[in-house]
Image (tube, helix red, strand yellow):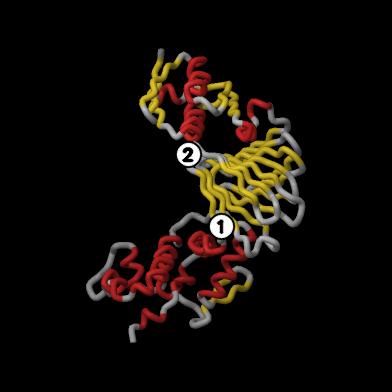
Amino acid sequence: MDKYLQCTPIELADDDSFIRWVKNSSRAGDLNWDTWLASNPGKSSDIQTAKHIVLGIQFKEEPVYQMTEDKVWSKINKDIGTNVNTGQVKSSKKSSTSIFKLISYGAVAAIALVLLMMNIGSDYDTSVQTPYAMVKTINLPDGSIVQMNADSKIEYDTKSWNENRFVSLDGEAFFSVQKGSKFTVKTDYGNVQVLGTSFNVNTRNQILNVICKTGKVAVINSQNESILAPDQSVSIVSQIHKFNNNTPRIEDRSSWIKGSYTYSNESLSKVISDLERQYDIKISIDKNLATTKYSGGFANGNIDNSLSEVMWPLGLKFTITGKDVKVTKE
């Protein structure tokens, strides 16, 4: 019997021949893994997981939030048969393997993160995505409401909702949360936790921006935690919290739910990104002009009016051809 058919992803990732194949450094006498995989398609999932583990050992250590970290170790215990004790990992089949002798705890955390990212989707049974030029309102199982902006995605699990009100967000959404157990919005740059309140979350361009409208909101990442009261906001840039004690109206991102977008000394490139999402257009502009700072805004509704509100004060003109917009200096 082929010994590799019985291997777990961890055991595959510990095989020298497999490691060399992943790193494109195979030697004479090594197993031809491409041929083997073609003959054993049922092991494709294990092979992909093992490949991510091999590559993950070289990752820099990333923050793993406690809730997701616990889920990772539980998943490893269940699916791979390992035992976890105070951060140490021991195989149930071998007391010690070379892979864990060679890697640091930071690398183990990287493996945990890889396994989480590969399997976390299986914990969600509902996914909603909005394309460009569309906003959508979603009712969650507890009656909480999510207003999704264009080009956004949320995921959540209805089966476990009563025990764990947990939503994954990529993009921008305004949440009106019913009172109850802890409600968590997960993003790539930090988590937002509340009990019952309303708030806006915008996670784009490697920045997380949260503004609280009612109640209180906790914004948490690996570096810090900010507690927001109404009209307070925080932006997380490169994991650093930038707190605003009293957010001016012109900097209030939540105004988008009323069809209004406002900016204060913002790079024109970011304003253009919002225009492209709201109208499903492609704007061409010289890179030097795109760095121009802009203060003002536009009302969503008419593309000509919106473009004029942004470009005219900056001395720029535009031409529209179908979905293509060209912006130039007057």
Position of residue 253 measured from the top left corner of the image (x, y, whole percent)? 62, 33
Real-space CA distance between mark 2 and mark 1, rounded to the nearest whole angstrom: 20 Å
User: Which one is nearer the viewer's eye here, 147 or 109?
Assistant: 147
* Residue ID at (60%, 62%): 69
Return the mark for residue 153.
none
Position of residue 109 measured from the top left corner of the image (x, y, whole percent)? 54, 62
**In the picture shown, does residue 16 fall above or below 224?**
below
- Which of the marked residues, 2 or 1, is nearer the chain's N terminus? 1
Is the residue marked by circle 1 packed among few (<14), some (14-19), or many (20+) residues within 10 Å?
few
If the image is split into quadrants, where does the N terminus sit? Answer: bottom left
| Residue 55 visible from this viewpoint | yes
Please give the count of numbered marks on the rendered protein: 2
Is the residue marked by circle 2 packed among few (<14), some (14-19), or many (20+) residues within 10 Å?
some
User: Which one is nearer the viewer's eye here, 166 or 58?
Assistant: 166
Q: Secondary structure at mark 2?
A: loop
For residue 222, side relative to residue 150 (left or right): right
* Residue ID at (49%, 82%): 94
- Residue where numbered disc 2 is placed: 132
Position of residue 146 measured from the top left corner of the image (x, y, whole percent)? 63, 46
Q: Amino acid at mark 2?
A: Tyr
Q: Amino acid at mark 1?
A: Thr
For residue 306, side relative to residue 85 (left or right): left
Which residue is farthest left? 28
* Residue ID at (57%, 43%): 136
Q: Secondary structure at mark 1?
A: strand
**In the picture shown, does residue 158 fall above or below 1?**
above
* Residue ID at (60%, 60%): 157
Position of residue 274 measured from the top left corner of the image (x, y, whole percent)? 51, 32
- Residue where numbered disc 1 is placed: 126
| Residue 188 visible from this viewpoint | no
